[in-house]
Image: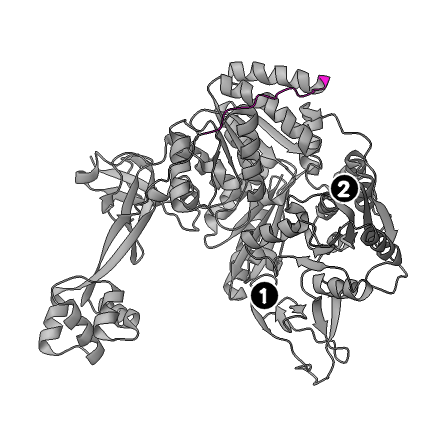
Amino acid sequence: MTLFADLVFPLPLARSFRYIVPDRLAVDALVGKRALAPLGRKTLAGFIVAVDDRPPDEGLVLKEILEILDPEPVVPPRAVDFTRRLGLHFGSSWGELLAACLPPSREIRTSTKVALTEEGRAALKDGSLSPEEKKAADVLGPNAYTLLHIRRKSGIKNPVSVVSRMRKKGWLEAREKAVPAVRKARLLPPASPAQLELDFSVGPALRSALAAADAALARGRFSPWLLFGDAEARLSACLQLIPKVLARSRQVLVLVPELALADPLREVLEKKLGENAAVLHGQQPDALREAEWGRIRDGEARIVLGPRSALFAPVESLGLVVVEDESDESHVQTESPAYDARRAAWMAAEDRGALLVLGSDAPTVEAFHRAREGGYLISLPRPGTVRPAEIVDDRGERGLIARRVMERLGDNLGRGRPSLIFVQRRGFASFLICPRCGHVPRCERCEIALTYHKKDERLVCRYCGDSRPREKACPECGGRVMEPRGVGVEAIEDELRKAFPAARIASFDSDRVRTRSAREKAAASWAAGRIDLLVGTEMLAHQDLPGAGCAVVLNPEVRLAHPDFRSAQRTFRSILRMTRLAAPDGDALVQTSAPDHHAVREAARRDYEAFFGVEIGFRRLMGYPPFSAMAEIVLPGRDLRPIARKARELVRLARDFGHGLEAVGPGLAPPSAAKGEKGLQIILKAENPEVLDAGLELILGAVQGRRSVTRFD
């Protein structure tokens, strides 16, 4: 009986490939193992996801698997099924999701060598080879070598084209070999003795929830909770819950939006619970990641911390998943494989009969609505009276910074207190414009306006990073003046230097502090009192900084102009996060030209529920999530013509699907979605999430090629 296997490869392909399993490999062909198989002109390592004896369709010729790479399955059946469902839900590559489940030592590198065929040796003897082909053949002789070896020994500048030409003529053959990575795990220090200081105050709502969670754990039943409150209250609640989970010999997974939060949280867990939690993320050195992965797999680490990729840690006995700061968009991965870790955490907890805790002081509108309707919203006790931020209306102001804001900054400087100033854009200006003809310099790749950096006198693309010197004159009309428009960090810094020449001023954005060490150095300078005025973008709000005497947010309403139904939610959250960095006795100011917009007004008051009351009415009126399910499909590429054909076919399939599935587009995708390329965007919408699921599965299965899918439901 002939067996057949379905393989998925760690490539941005949302499909599997079927192969014949040779008799010699039949016993070893198991789901979860990896196999070497031909794919096009290459030989790649893929994951076996199904094995059966179902013959292929008539007329379909299948290739054979070449080699089984693992003695035992490297991905357990539960993870195979979880990644399958995750890939279907988000239209992502199953193979790439499976690859995320592996430790560094399980990575496979395919080494390619070429050798002369019988025809090649005959051509060498009869002089049929060109001079460059003869050089390559002389180097090879009876052996097989890599292209790098051929180039070094023969002196051929471009061996790729020579080898490709010889392969087409049948004179060379490729020999592939899978080479597993070898990495030695690094030992970690043991946990320090616990300091059991678990005397946390809990309100009646949390006390009741903890009892219900304990009962759900005992029955192994999935149970979700949304903890609505500030970070300290959420941490206290989780420190009450985690020991209950550990006492039942189950593991805990905590997803954090920022890597900077993982180590401080590990220290808290070690101090309060005596647990040496494992931290897992892609930026770790391979040896450390290997060690942490092993501790998790062996059950030695009972708590796992990390960003969204920690979802794929080898947690065998999952009892609790915590998604910290649920509204942070860092939980969403837009590059392949695309997925939303919040939805994925729900799926994982539901599958394993675990508890799920979503925590935020400004949850997404969808999460808050569902928690309230579903009866799993827990409002945590709030600290004492919180001072609202002052709204400064800058309509009619001439300068970049309003007079009232300048006064408060001056007052704090006079008292020796530092201030934070948040700006919405990097660089000096969002773009340059010719006042004579209206020309705006744009990125040739992304077709968006280039940001002007005055200090470097360069124009930089915010999406692909391409840059070029500033144009002194307009390339269209020859006009001598190119005016800057749109306020950036550098422009605000210049304004502050003019107003406060003696102040110590520094900037904090991704152009100035590119590395983690640079961010830590800047934060340390702030904490040591060596900076009077620190100007930065919102990334500054992600740092663990001592409270400022004054925290100023300049023109946050620019977010409201974004063509996105979530723009008000993002604006509210952004203001809340930035003004929160004012010290308890400090000032918080919001300079805006939209003082009456509910996102700005309620964020200044720190009143999420008032904001939610207005926003949910808007969502209901427009039929946006949570009152519908939506998906954005982006087809990226260099040439729009072939993409347009696929996009039109995708829209046709969606409209033919029926069942209330709506399709809007295609239209040009924003550069942030197309990742530095051109791209087309299609929006799918349905009242019922199951209709969207079925429609996506049909459409994405019929239209192959590169794409990214973002779900809003």
Q: Which residue is mark 1?
A: 446
* Marks 1/2: CA–CA distance: 41 Å
Which residue occupies the foreground of this view, 141 or 284?
A: 284
Residue type marked 2: Ala
Which residue occupies the foreground of this view, 604 or 24?
A: 604
Give x and y (percent) for residue 11. Answer: 40, 50
Magenta stretch encompasses residue 30: no
Q: In terms of sequence position, does the residue under pointer 1 or pointer 2 come before the other?
A: 1
**Of marks 1 and 2, the one in the foreground:** 2
Label 1: few (<14), some (14–19) or many (≥20) C-alpha neighbours in 10 Å: many
The stretch in magenta equals 191-204
Instruction: Tell me: residue 665, above or below residue 694.
Output: below
Instruction: Tell me: residue 244, above or below residue 430.
Output: above
Instruction: Tell me: residue 170, above or below residue 613.
Output: below
Q: Residue furthest right?
A: 396
Give x and y (percent) for residue 216. Answer: 56, 17
Name the secondary structure under disc 2.
strand
Kindly identify which numbered label has been placed on residue 583.
Answer: 2
Q: Residue furthest bottom?
A: 478
Majority secondary structure in the magenta region: loop
The answer to whether the residues at label 1 and label 2 have Cβ atoms under 8 Å apart is: no
Which residue occupies the foreground of this view, 362 or 534?
A: 534
- Quarter of the image for residue 260 reads top right
Name the secondary structure under disc 1.
loop
> Which part of the image, by quadrant, shows the C terminus?
top right
Label 2: few (<14), some (14–19) or many (≥20) C-alpha neighbours in 10 Å: some
- Point 59% across, 52% down: residue: 521
Magenta stretch encompasses residue 198: yes
- Point 50% across, 24% down: residue: 193
